[in-house]
Image (cartoon, grey):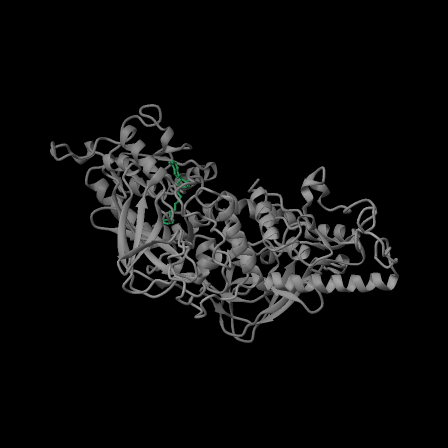
Amino acid sequence: ALKLKPDYPEAKENFYRVANWLVERWHFLMLNDRRRNHKYQQAIQKAVEGGCNTVLDIGTGTGILGMCAKKAGAAEVYACELSKTMYELACEVVTANGMNGRIKILHMKSLEMEVPKDIPKRVSLVVTETVDAGLFGEGIIESLIHAWNHLLLPPQSTQDPSRPPSQAGRVIPAGATVFGMAVQCLEIRRLTTAAAGELHSPVSCSSEDDSTEPYTTERLSRLPGGYTPLTEPFNALDIDFNNVQELEGLCSREVSRVRLPVTGEGLLDALAVWFQLHLDQQSSLSTGPKEDTCWEQAIYPIQTPHNFPLRPGDELIVEISCRDAYLRLCSVAVARDGREFRLDDCLDPDIPRNNPGPSGNPNPSLNAEAELCSALACLGTEQSSGPRDYTMLECAEMALLNNQPYHDSFRRALAKLITNLKDARSIQGPSKGQGLEVMPLTDPPSGPMDPGPDPFYVLDVSEGFSVLSLMAASQGQVKAYSSVEKTQHQAVLRRLAMANGVPEEALEFWLNQVEDEQAVLQRPSREKLWSAIILDCVETCGLVRQKLMEKATLARCLLEDGGQIFPERIVLYGMLVESDTLLLESAVQGQEPTLGFNIAPFINQFTVPVHVFLDLSTLQCRHLSDSVELFILDLMNTNANYTNRDVMVQASASGRVTAVPFWYQIHLNEEISVSTFNQDSHWKQAAVVLHQPLAVREGDWVRLAVTLYILLDECISIT
Ligand SMILES: CCc1ccncc1CNCCCCSC[C@H]1O[C@@H](n2ccc3c(N)ncnc32)[C@H](O)[C@@H]1O
């Protein structure tokens, strides 16, 4: 199917989403990282020339490390790859480089491999780079324990050093050193703690729940606003991959505690973790924040109340464990003036609360959103007797909760609409229960209480997590329905509603009412229509949501007179940039970075022209034009929309255009709009990466042809 690549836009859109999913973007980064490739090649060559002549490449990906071993002269080379797509790709690459039949590639996980079923006999060298930002996330520990027990010759032992290297087993990388560092970082705080700093983070630091990875990943050197180190980097763990006893003992190793002198002033937001891969005794690869490598660091968020900044002289106590093969850093505490405060239950009374928060005022007045979140937090603690239950929100969802300008804009736009509709109703005269008829002055009416004025029905059909139905319900006289369907999302909304005094009956979950998913958009009840329908138009990845126009058209038919859909219009903006970073993340740049092996054409089949989840505010790039309006989507009048449009952009500087980043201005009504490109935005941005960089001189005009599916690249032709 990937080879089909039909031409019509929607199919292309789907092709690009599939390609993004089949092949992870870090394959491009890794293969373009010539220093990394060169270091692996050197280590492999040295080992093979030193006598390791039977090699197994675990997690071969495109096959590059196996080909290094073959080229270095290894007699037998085997490779295994668990991803079908990568396995097929590795077969093509090995053939294209004349090594077909000389490297045996298996489509399987190394844990399933056996001697002699899969490889004739044990090998003398295993090479692998099955590591993620938290080192253990790709299962390297389990893979190596299995390899030592079933696939590798016994290691060189001091007893009989006479055994030649070809009869002894070893691993490249030989080991790893894991480093950690405490940091203050506003961006991490925005992604992991709610405004009041008490709603629980998306990744719980408690070791209780083993289900999710205990860390997220970020590239510290690229985070908006940067970070402040609060301690020196510390050595969290050393692991020797050539010592199977050590590997087997890792998970049962007792929790270790390190005491770190605090060297900087600030709020503890997270522990950042990275590592050095020791390929052999001489060379190593580092994924540290100071390196200019392309790798991200592992981030362990820490929930600390806003009124407890660390300061030099404190000691930070960190516990390190390797429970179930994930590296876990957590349940930190602070030693100050000889006393120890556990941070995770820092809310207990004896913490000095008089010290002002970072903003200086002792109790920053929590705004509406923060009220919600802090109320939620204490609700959380009240309800659960045991360890505080964690509200599992993804980082993007937490950022959405923290995007106060977005919520305020919605609240204002909704309030304006409700006011208009109230005026309209009062002009049309009293409808049922408008309350104008004279109430009997005697005892209260015996019949059912006057139902009060008809409520305004608002439906939020957002596909992900959304609190906009809550914004509507808190307006009063509004009956809001939310199509949020995940239980933990509904739980968060219910608790926020309760915490914010929104009556239970003002917010309902629509999907629990309709018989099937398709009926998400339908009348609230037989004779009623919606006063407002809220659509979420832009995915957090930065692309317009698919089938948005169809949804808008249907939604408009379900509105009462004067009703409105939100937003009514979105305007797409973009600019011309020169960015090598985007090139390195989107395609392998020729043969040179991949040690001269012909790999690029094969992996680049999975290049997608639209790059998503970008942080445009920190992307290394040169602007080669101003921002220009590329496209307008009118949701209140869909046939006013064109499907493509030519836009002329003037180059404001000479350079090579490599990409066209884009973002949106979301118009809720005539005066109120929200941008998806600002520091509060929970949205990331997207960019089209050109197949071929385009050289422009200052003043040149570039013609961009833009289609609704934002797949600008095919249509970009330059005059
Ligand atoms: C400086 C390294 C670095 C630091 C921080 N962040 C990223 C990196 C770069 N490394 C990323 C590799 C990560 C993916 S691993 C590469 C390929 O191996 C496959 N696999 C994984 C385990 C496994 C197994 N047991 N048996 C067979 N196949 C296996 C995966 O299917 C994938 O295609």
Residue at 58% x, 49% y: name it.
495
Residue in view at x 19 percent, y 41 percent: 50
Q: Is residue 616 left or right of residue 335?
A: right
Query: Quick check: 621 above or below 584?
Result: below
Q: Which percent across, then down, holds residue 337?
A: 27, 61
Q: Quadrant of the C terminus?
A: bottom right
**Relative to 715, 643 lies left or right:** right
Question: Can residue 687 be seen here?
Answer: no
Residue 164 visible in the snapshot:
yes
Residues 355 and 3: in front is 355
Q: Residue 557: x, y in percent?
A: 79, 52
Tell me where residue 12 appears, x and y as whole percent. 61, 48
Q: Is residue 562 left or right of residue 117?
A: right
Quadrant holding the N terminus: top right
- Foreground of the two, 384 or 234: 384
Indicate whether 232 appears above or below 481.
Answer: below
- Ligand 1 quarter of the rendering: top left
Give the residue furthest to the top: 117
**Closer to the camera in the image, 112 or 107:** 112
At 53% from the left and 45% from the top, the residue drawn is 19
